[in-house]
Amino acid sequence: MESVIRAPGLVALLPEAVLADTRGHLRTVEEHLAQNRWGDGGAAPQLFVAVQGREIEIDDAWSTPAASSDAVDLTIGASVGLDSGWFVGGAIGSQQGEADIDDAGSGFDSSGLMASAFAAWRCDGWFADLVLSAGQSDLDDIQRVFEIGPAQDRRESGDTEADVLGLSGAVGVDMSDAANAWRAGPFLALDWLDIDVDGYAEGGLSSSTMQYGDLARESLLGSAGIFGSYPIALGAASVELSADVAYVEEFEDDPQDVTAVVKSLPTGPSFRMPGYAIDDDGWRATLGASASWQGGLRLGLSYRHADNDTEAQYLNLSASYAF
């Protein structure tokens, strides 16, 4: 009975892991776009690479257990400037993550591959970014561990995969005085992500082995905030310090039910249990610095913190070269 009741809550976290992988990839693309927001740097052909580490903590809820995950992303890409303030490019990224659930030994590994195409426009202090992403993620070694009696643990495991499609955009304007070195102003952003996790069956035919239906997770996340940046000279390098803070709102906040059936009873009865309880609002902030040199080399470092029921931290290190 405990297995039947608790299993859907663990499985409901699988789409959340894929969502975190996808947002991690988008974060690295956004960093490249932000570094080319001002001046004419985006006009030159560029190659860039970024390594990002992230840590996510999910509080327990009435339907899902507490969980934590660590992951690392590697992204490479290129961009080139066009006429009239436009530049376009593409990127491909690999994500590797590990999730620990409920401190009992449950968890899973995730590995994904994402590709993105992006376009950006800059004109008279205005900027607009658009990113289209697609990819696939493997969810391996999904371990579900629970107690049977006072001294025995049972372990059930399985594997599955997920498909991802996403579209994100942002628009903002620098409202500072043209004679001022500071740049500051408001921005709006909207991210849409669609994630489909294939149903899977746990191995074996014990009384607690389960089979799960497909899982769907759709996210429509809006952000409204302010940004600021300030350039300084540091030896031969031109350094730009930047920061932003934004209020975020999740518009697709209805939890998706998890369909399951005891595997030893393939004809049923199947049942549905509530999935992950989505928190619909919160805050996020970013601090960053980038240094560029005359030869075309640029290095960047940024930190982002997002906090609601899910607390996420991102540390991003990037390098680019303009030809």
Image: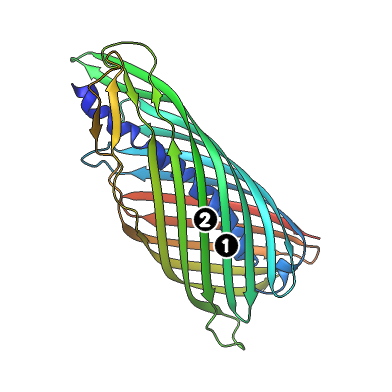
- Residue 98 in the image: x percent, y percent? 46, 33
The quarter of the picture where residue 88 lies is bottom right
Q: Is 126 or 153 nearer to us in this picture?
A: 126
Residue beneath the point at 20% across and 23% down: 2
Q: Which residue is mark 1?
A: 130
Answer with mark 2 or mark 1, whichever residue precedes in sequence.
1
Residue beneath the point at 44% across and 31% down: 198
Element on which disc 1 rests: strand
Residue 75, compared with residue 197, is above or below; it is: below
Point out which mark residue 21 bears.
none
Q: Is 210 or 102 nearer to us in this picture?
A: 210
Q: Quadrant of the C terminus?
A: bottom right
Q: Is residue 235 visible?
A: no
Q: Name the amino acid type tagged 2.
A: Leu
Residue beneath the point at 33% across and 43% down: 58
Q: Are marks 2 and 1 in contact (CB under 8 Å)?
A: yes
The quarter of the picture where residue 247 lies is bottom left
Residue 286, compared with residue 112, is above or below; it is: below
Q: Name the amino acid type tagged 1.
A: Leu
- Residue 103 in the image: x percent, y percent? 31, 30
- Residue 248 in the image: x percent, y percent? 38, 62
The answer to whether 33 appears left or right of 46 in the picture is left
The answer to whether 243 appears left or right of 179 in the picture is left
Rounded to the nearest whole Å, what is the CA distance between mark 2 and mark 1?
7 Å
Q: Which residue is mark 2?
A: 167
